[in-house]
Image (tube, rainbow, N blue to C red):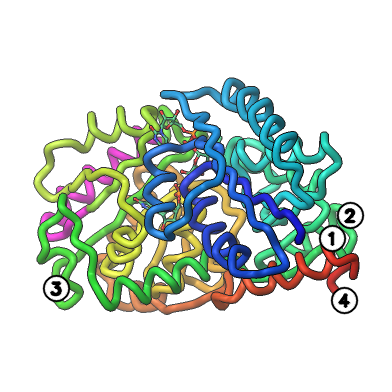
Amino acid sequence: MKKVSVIFGTRPEAIKLCPLVLALQEDPQFEAHVCATGQHREMLDQVLQVFGVTPDVDLALMQDNQTLASLTSRAITAIDGYIVDYEPDLVLVQGDTTTVFTAALAAFYHRIPVGHVEAGLRTWNKFSPYPEEINRVLASHIADYHFAPTCWAQQNLLKEGVQAERIYVTGNTVIDALYIAVDKVRKLRPQITELSAGLLNSSIDQRLVLITGHRRESFGHGFECICRAIATLAEKFADTEFVYPVHLNPNVREPVFRLLGHRKNIRLIEPLDYLSFVALMDRSTLVLTDSGGVQEEAPSLGKPVLVMRDTTERPEAVEAGTVKLVGTDVRQIIDTVSQLLTDTDAYGRMAQAVNPYGDGKATGRILAACRRFLNGRGGNT
Ligand code: UD1
Ligand code: UDP
């Protein structure tokens, strides 16, 4: 049996890797081992609970308001110790966080092959998103096997000189996770204690703008602008509910609660467990976000997404017409949301269900690829 170590640390990595963990655990060819770095704590534990995944090892790295350097140095040392103890045949990581970069580097130091899930996303701007663009570029340089979610991501890797036979176009596992979640929440709507039961009811007419935001490059001025725009919109559209599950990063919470707290139609709530968040996304009129994962999920649900960033590494849904970049400019956010809330044609053009990121079968393709290369049958042909 081949020992496959799945290493993750934050909410989005767990969402995108839990379906793969569950599949690996069912496959008799693999001994799956889960290492949570604990880069996130509450937000990671929420995801693990939903998928019923219990890490074999938890490195419990999170500290309050951690800096990039302190997290990176603690992570590389702790993951190194884990790899020495467990001696995996393969390490799998996902995405572009500090956990991904440090886990890939630690595995490389022990000459253990690395498979990178969601490989090949790029903005070619090293400060946007920051530090994720550089984390994923470095992960690509270290990785031996690259699971590209789309053909566009595959092309990016090819242009950087990655050998074609080491790239597998698989779709994004976020869609696998989303399908599992949608199936559950459409059968049994979760209750969100901080919101009234009526608000979650899909048959009521109440408009709902769902908001998330956490990007480091927007700390300070960017978040002040985002909040000013939301405050103005909430006044202008008094009949619309603005629901914002606020990320636990203190650099996000401080401006958000200071500028948006105590307003009649703005609901600032705690981060939601994955099923509740999917239910809310499914119920929303439109989504205002800077999240990577939400940009991938909401188009599948036919929800217009306005991305509060200047760049995106996920151009596919922009090309399909359901996602628009609005940056952190106050005027642009206000004008674009206002147009969608008042112009039914403009809304209709964006609110189509498109699915450029996968068909819900990425996990199976990644597993099949792992079987091939761990059994010495080489590349993707
Ligand atoms: C991290 C990732 C980012 C990813 C995001 C997903 C890095 C550098 N950043 O950003 O790429 O998009 O996660 O959400 O890898 N905190 C808690 N509890 C939690 C999680 C966070 O209290 O469950 C607070 C802590 O004070 C922590 C801080 O948030 O120090 C920052 O966490 P960190 O993982 O460094 O950065 P994120 O902004 O969450
Ligand atoms: N999400 C969640 N609860 C929330 C907000 C988001 O479960 O309150 C999920 C969302 O569905 C998506 C993922 O978290 O799958 C995105 O995480 P985040 O925005 O923190 O990180 P990113 O994707 O930008 O790296």
Residue holding disc 3: 205
Upstream in the sequence, badge 3 or badge 4? 3
Cα–Cα span, label 3 and label 1 = 48 Å
Residue holding disc 4: 381
Name the residue at 67% across, 55% down. Answer: 121
Magenta stretch bounds: 223-242
Q: Quadrant of residue 288?
A: bottom left
Residue holding disc 1: 158
Q: Horizontal and vertical percent for residue 312? A: 57, 53
Q: Horizontal and vertical percent for residue 342? A: 24, 68
Marks 1, 4: nearer the viewer? 4
Left of 149 or right of it: where is 230? left
Upstream in the sequence, badge 1 or badge 4? 1
Proximity of marks 3 and 4: CB atoms separated by less than 8 Å: no
Circle 1: residue type: Leu
Residue 225 visible, this angle: yes
Circle 4: residue type: Thr
What secondary structure is marked by label 3? Answer: loop
